[in-house]
């Protein structure tokens, strides 16, 4: 069954005859009759009975018509959408988990409204995956947390977040105005897995400070850490914005003022390969957009402005 067959049935039903319907559809009576006969065979039900006045819909046809008419309209709109979108170029961009939450959906909407010929598809994944997509040329441009290998990539600072500890309010650490990584010595700690750049940064700070957590739990997304903190099972290492948005329950957010360990996110691309037109337009847009919206975005407590 196809869209044209459904439309033909609906017009015959509305016109009350093959002849009138054929004229409206600009087809021959013979061709339209064949279409209806084929549709009846597919449905396994008769749709019309012939009479001297034309055709009479069967009870099945009367029940089918409103649904067929609605379905034909839906399929028509899908065809229109597909035709409209067929000329748009899809730009695939990868970014670390939490990126869209940081910048908001307005970042995507603003880009597509100013670039109607482009459709932006952002895939949130790990920093390791972003690197793989760039290295295999599956994408031209993306976002990656630092430190970035500048021998491989051109890197443009985009957003910066401060690390914070999300702790249960029963933990004495919750009373501190600020904390340091040394406060995690002997504690059960949860943080994003090693496929994310912050993992290496934080573990590096543990080594530098001689910190030995009792247990280090790697998670694939930050909310698992927030839940563990809320149930007083672990201290979650997160960032200012993500904790302010996602941490719930009887917890406190304690900032870590460490200028050497921040969550810096860069817009990155292969420095040796010229960007295509779409990726170049996105790069210019993204850097301009973040410069204009920082004051609106960086409004949470402990944010780096």
Image (tube, rainbow, N blue to C red):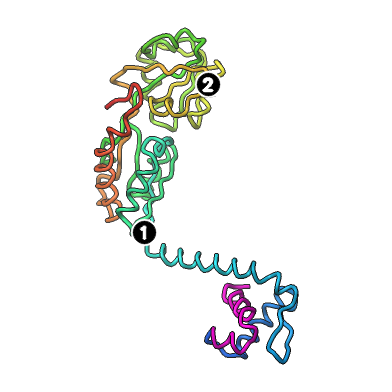
Circle 2 packing at 10 Å, graded few (<14), some (14-19), many (20+), is few
48 and 115: which is toward the camera: 48
* Image quarter of residue 13: bottom right
* SS of the residue under disc 1: strand
Q: Quadrant of residue 301?
A: top left
Residue 118: x and y in percent read 34, 56
| Point 33% across, 48% down: residue | 110
Quadrant in which the N terminus is drawn: bottom right
Is 204 or 45 nearer to us in this picture? 45
Element type at mark 2 = loop
Whether residue 49 appears in magenta in the rendering, the answer is no
Q: Is there a contact, CB below 8 Å, between mark 2 and mark 1? A: no
Q: Residue at horizontal 38%, vertical 35%?
A: 102
User: Earlier along the polypeptide chain: callout 2 or callout 1?
Assistant: 1
Point out the stretch of residues depicted in magenta. Answer: 1-24
The residue located at (47%, 14%) in the rendering is 213
Which residue is at the far top?
Answer: 172
Q: Which residue is mark 2?
A: 249
Q: Distance between the Cα atoms at labels 2 and 1?
A: 43 Å
Give the left or right position of residue 279, taking residue 229 as reference. Answer: left
Q: In the rendered structure, find residue 15 and report the number of the disc placed on it.
A: none
Q: Is residue 273 left or right of residue 86?
A: left
Residue 250 is situated, as x and y percent measured from the top left of the image, at 52, 17
Q: Quadrant location of residue 64?
A: bottom right
Q: Residues within 10 Å of mark 1 (few under 14, many from 20)?
A: few
Prevailing secondary structure of the magenta residues = helix
- Residue named by callout 1: 89
């Amino acid at each position: 069954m196809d869209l044209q067959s459904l439309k033909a049935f609906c017009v015959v039903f509305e016109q009350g005859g093959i002849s009138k319907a054929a004229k409206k559809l600009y087809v021959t009576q013979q061709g339209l009759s064949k279409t209806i006969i084929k549709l009846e065979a597919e449905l396994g039900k008769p749709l019309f009975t012939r009479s001297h006045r034309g055709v009479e819909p069967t009870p099945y046809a009367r029940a089918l018509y409103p649904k067929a008419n609605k379905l034909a309209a839906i399929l028509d709109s899908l065809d229109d959408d597909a035709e409209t979108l067929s000329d748009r170029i899809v730009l695939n961009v990868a970014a670390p988990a939490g990126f869209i939450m940081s910048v908001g959906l307005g970042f995507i909407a603003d880009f597509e409204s100013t670039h109607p010929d482009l459709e932006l598809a952002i895939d949130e994944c790990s920093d390791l995956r972003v690197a793989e997509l760039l290295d295999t040329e599956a994408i031209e441009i993306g976002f990656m947390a630092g430190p970035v290998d500048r021998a491989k990539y051109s890197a443009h600072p985009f957003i910066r977040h401060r690390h914070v500890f999300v702790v249960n309010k029963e933990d004495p650490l919750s009373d501190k105005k600020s904390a340091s990584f040394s406060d995690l010595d002997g504690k059960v700690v949860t943080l994003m897995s090693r496929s994310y750049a912050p993992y290496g940064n934080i573990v590096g700070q543990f080594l530098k400070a001689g910190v030995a957590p009792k247990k280090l739990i790697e998670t694939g997304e930050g909310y698992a850490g927030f839940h563990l903190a809320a149930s007083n099972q672990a201290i979650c290492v997160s960032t200012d914005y993500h904790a302010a948005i996602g941490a719930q329950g009887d917890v406190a957010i304690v900032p870590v003022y460490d200028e050497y360990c921040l969550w810096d996110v860069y817009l990155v691309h292969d420095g040796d390969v010229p960007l295509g037109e779409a990726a170049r337009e996105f790069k210019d847009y993204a850097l301009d957009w973040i410069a204009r919206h920082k004051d609106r975005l960086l409004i949470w407590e402990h944010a780096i402005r």
